Image (cartoon, coloured by chain):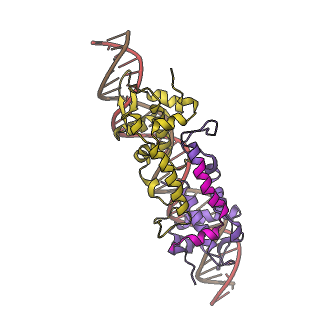
Chain colours: A purple, B yellow, C brown, D red
Amino acid sequence: MSLLFSRQCEYALQAVLYLAKMPPGSMTSIKEMAAKLDIPYHYLAKILQSLTYKGLLRSLKGRAGGFALRLPVEQITLLQVIDAVDGSAIKNTCVMGFGECSEENPCALHDEWVRLRTGLFDVLIDKNVIQLAKEMKKPVYEVLT
Amino acid sequence: MSLLFSRQCEYALQAVLYLAKMPPGSMTSIKEMAAKLDIPYHYLAKILQSLTYKGLLRSLKGRAGGFALRLPVEQITLLQVIDAVDGSAIKNTCVMGFGECSEENPCALHDEWVRLRTGLFDVLIDKNVIQLAKEMKKPVYEVLT
DNA sequence: TTAATTTCAGATAAATTACTCTTAAATAAA
DNA sequence: TTTATTTAAGAGTAATTTATCTGAAATTAA
């Protein structure tokens, strides 16, 4: 089961952080990312296409083609990615599944969930992708020379 | 999209809290819960059957039959319900979807996610269902006279 | 110009999750 | 004992999500 984010969104987050670590101006291919991140090739292709369509990435066909972040890394947050893929559900969906859930009409976990979610969002918004990518110690993200 | 918990788990949580507010000893029918909580009847039936099989509820067939919590409300936590329905995925799954994710090999959101998850678990474990049910102001949970 | 590489686009397939239907079995009331 | 009500169980259907396949279009290098 995917958790908090859809599978598609998880892949998108991984890919965007991967691109964030690449030298600015360079293009990275689906092939490379699919291999490094262990994501099904064609599925990743769809996701990257969609992110391109939504303005987060730019793409180039042909020999030296691939994908890159549309904007400088300082201007991209993971929340933008989540928004683009999963929409705003995470921002206002009741964690217990009730249709309506608010301060006036809270579920048993409402207050706690709002508190925790807000903390997560602070990170998703305040830290740009390059900061996050740097904190991550995953070998697959090591920059190639 | 469901969020954090599967749909099935959300329904289970709603139903268990509903039962927690019922007078001890009384049985509540699927019919009543499905109507009050707006959950598909047969689907809820399956979920309650499963919770019964797993020892969280007891059931009684026939005229005055229905479901009730197997143990006193003081001894039931929502984490037990989550465990029974969604398993332990939430306890150790990486929020970014990486296969391996730990202190030594963390994803970009690892620390933040651990913090959030721990905070949530504190509530899910420390507060028993009757406390949670009482804090919840949802009209559907008002005890009938 | 030709060939190789890469994204683009659309259709399709597989897997998972959510939901429905039907019949049987148990229980209690009439 | 009969009938109404309720859970039990299994099969079946629908919807959604995830993943695959194929061929076209663009770009670059030879």
- Segment colored magenta: A114-138
| x then y, percent, for residue B17 | 48, 35
Nearer to the camera, B128 or A9: B128
| x then y, percent, for residue A117 | 59, 52
Q: Is residue A22 above or below residue A116?
A: below
Please report the residue visible at 36 percent of the width from the left and 23 percent of the height from the top: B62
Total marks in image = 0
| x then y, percent, for residue B5 | 50, 48
Q: Is residue B86 above or below residue B129?
A: below
Quadrant of the rendered structure where residue A30 is? Answer: bottom right
Left/right placement of residue A68 relative to residue B68 reads right
Q: Is residue A103 above or below residue A35?
A: above
Residue A125 magenta: yes
Nearer to the camera, B29 or A40: B29
**Visible residue check, residue B39:** no
Please report the residue visible at 50 percent of the width from the left and 67 percent of the height from the top: B106
Nearer to the camera, B71 or A19: B71
Nearer to the camera, A61 or A107: A107
Please report the residue visible at 60 percent of the width from the left and 55 percent of the height from the top: A119
**Visible residue check, residue B89:** yes
| x then y, percent, for residue A101 | 61, 39
Quadrant of the rendered structure where residue A31 is? Answer: bottom right
Helix, strand or loop for the magenta stretch, by majority? helix
Residue B97 magenta: no
